């Protein structure tokens, strides 16, 4: 079981989520956006800088995939 911090409890109680878009990973951003969209937020309500960050992360992921630049996790081999 994950222990919730005071900050997480406050965010859950207020229904707001704080995200540092400068350091968030693509996976975390997709999960966060999926959650707010699933909860009923309209796409027009999502801030433009957040969408721009999503575009940047997706573009970077595509470049990594096209060029085979992903490093294997330690102890694993890429095939």
Image (cartoon, helix red, strand yellow):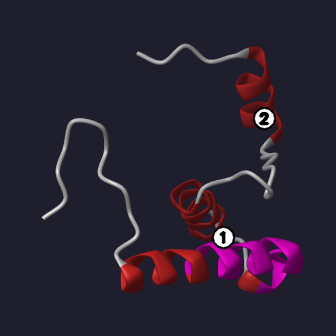
Q: CA distance from mark 2 to mark 1?
A: 18 Å
> Residue 25: x, y in percent?
60, 56
> Residue 68: x, y in percent?
34, 75
**Marker disc for residue 30:** none
Please report the bounds of the magenta region as a residue range: 44-58
Q: Residues within 10 Å of mark 1 (few under 14, many from 20)?
A: few
Q: Are marks 2 and 1 in contact (CB under 8 Å)?
A: no
> Residue 61: x, y in percent?
50, 75
Tally of numbered tags: 2
**Residue 66 placement: quadrant:** bottom left
**Above or below for 13 versus 62:** above
Which residue is the site of mark 1?
40
Marks 2 and 1, the one that precedes in the sequence: 2
22 to the left or right of 26: right
**Above or below for 42 versus 36:** below
Q: Secondary structure at mark 1?
A: loop
Q: Nearer the viewer, residue 16 or 25?
A: 25
Q: What main secondary structure does the magenta stretch of the protein show?
A: helix
30 to the left or right of 49: left
**Marker disc for residue 11:** 2
């Amino acid at each position: 079981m994950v222990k919730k911090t005071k900050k997480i409890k406050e965010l859950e109680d207020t229904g707001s989520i704080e995200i540092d878009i400068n350091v968030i990973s693509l996976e975390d951003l997709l999960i966060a956006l999926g959650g707010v969209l699933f909860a009923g937020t309209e796409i027009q309500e999502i801030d433009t800088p957040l969408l721009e960050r999503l575009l940047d992360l997706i573009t970077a992921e595509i470049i990594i995939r096209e060029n085979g630049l992903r490093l294997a996790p330690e102890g694993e081999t890429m095939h």
